[in-house]
Amino acid sequence: RAHCTLALRRCAPRPARRSCRLAPAAVAAVASELRVTADTAGALLLLEGVGLRAGAAELLSGADLRVTKGQRWAIVGPNGAGKSTLLRAIAGETDAQSDGMVTLHPGAQMGFLRQTAVAGSTRPVLEEASSMSRVAAAAGKAREAEAALEAAEGDEAHKLVKAAGVYADALADLEALGGEEAGEALAARVLKGLGFSDADLTRGCDTFSGGWQMRIGLAKVLLQEPEVLLLDEPSNHLDAAAKTWLGDYLASYPYSLMLVSHDAPLMEAACTHVAEVSSGRLSSYAGGWKAFQQLRAQKMVNDRSELEKLDKEAAELEAFIRRFGAKATMAAQANSRKLRLAKLDVRRQELRAVVASDRQAAIASEAAEAASEGGEAALALVGSGRMAVKLHKPPRSTREQLVVSKAAVGHNGGPSATLDDAVLGDIDFKLDRHM
């Protein structure tokens, strides 16, 4: 027994004894048994007929999505469309799901970065960030197996052999990951990529501001390396260098990713697929951000073309009904056209909603592009009924491309217009370029 135990202990270094307590953090390791079934048809994550509601408002209806290993999805759409709510529903952290099923593959782990900062942890940054990593989990199992082996030393031989085998397997798993030193090196690399210095790694998490605590939370979920990684606006508190690093890191993420973001370069660098949430529907596209923009632009053209074609046909039907509807000899033809018009009206109504949704989505996409290029605009009224638009970067072309949202402009007691009207040239405005 002593020889067997001693040989096992020599085969690998003993894992250091470290605290494994978990502090509240921006990361949720989701392991809801209710959301795990055996029938995912090979997918890591499966959405089937998912519906979402916010109070009485329907955010999403009949959403289907199949996420497999290696797919990295950008979740895009207008503000308030339900992107973050969808992530929380997938993670099982909201009661907004009104219909359908979210299925996680058996044995798969889910990691979720919320839009809230790390709170309550006083541990050093390096320890906090690496506390849920695969290396930390393997080291914890090795320590547990070692303790079980030591406890079995006075037991019967078969129990000792079994405990020794478990310990050997645990050490092999840890060794396959490179050991704890490799785990610490990876954690340090991730933290430095997100902007932390060597000196920062030993500072307590509670000594950092909320934005830097978000970076710690991001590092923690990245190091967790879950099979399904959910990130909600991870670049909100990052500078340009950290955003670039994050895009490169996610581009090589070996499992699956669902990323809610308004950062176009990040999505282009990191994602292989795009899912658009808009007007209660979830539409999926293969390819990165730029490919999505091209496909969606063609879809918008097709939708408008179909609507124009149906409007023209409806006008012809209405004209025939007005002309011949009262004539007995033409009653059958008029009634036939009324039935056709009723069917057209249903489809036209659907298409109008789709075209309106397309326009909102296009504005959201342009906003993502402008924000990523530093094109934030500050608006101010100049004089009576005039508007100044201050661009914090040069215009991208001789024809200003402004990303706008609805906002009333005007003066008290006078007529108001919308910012869209100003951009379209329907009201007077002054453009003030600031290089």
Image (tube, rainbow, N blue to C red):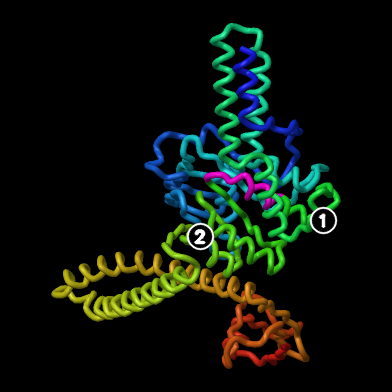
Q: Is residue 62 visible?
A: no
- 271 on left or right of 380: left
For the record, the magenta segment spans: 217-227
Would you name the residue on which mark 1 appears?
209
Q: Residue at x 69, y 43 (%)?
A: 181
- Image coordinates of residue 377 in percent, x first then y, are 69, 79
Q: Is residue 297 visible?
A: yes
Q: Amino acid at mark 1?
A: Ser
The quadrant the C terminus occupies is bottom right
- Image coordinates of residue 167 in percent, x first then y, are 60, 24
- Image coordinates of residue 330 in percent, x first then y, are 16, 75
- 155 on left or right of 77: right
> Of the numbered discs in the image, which one, if any, rests on residue 277?
2
Q: From this viewpoint, which residue is outermost toward the top?
A: 156
Q: Gap between marks 1 and 2, in whole Å?
A: 32 Å
Q: Amino acid at mark 2?
A: Val
Q: Residue at x 78, y 46 (%)?
A: 119
> Of the numbered discs in the image, which one, if any, rests on residue 129?
none
Q: Is residue 298 above or below residue 178?
A: below
Front-lying residue, 212 or 210: 212
Q: Residue at x 69, y 81 (%)?
A: 409
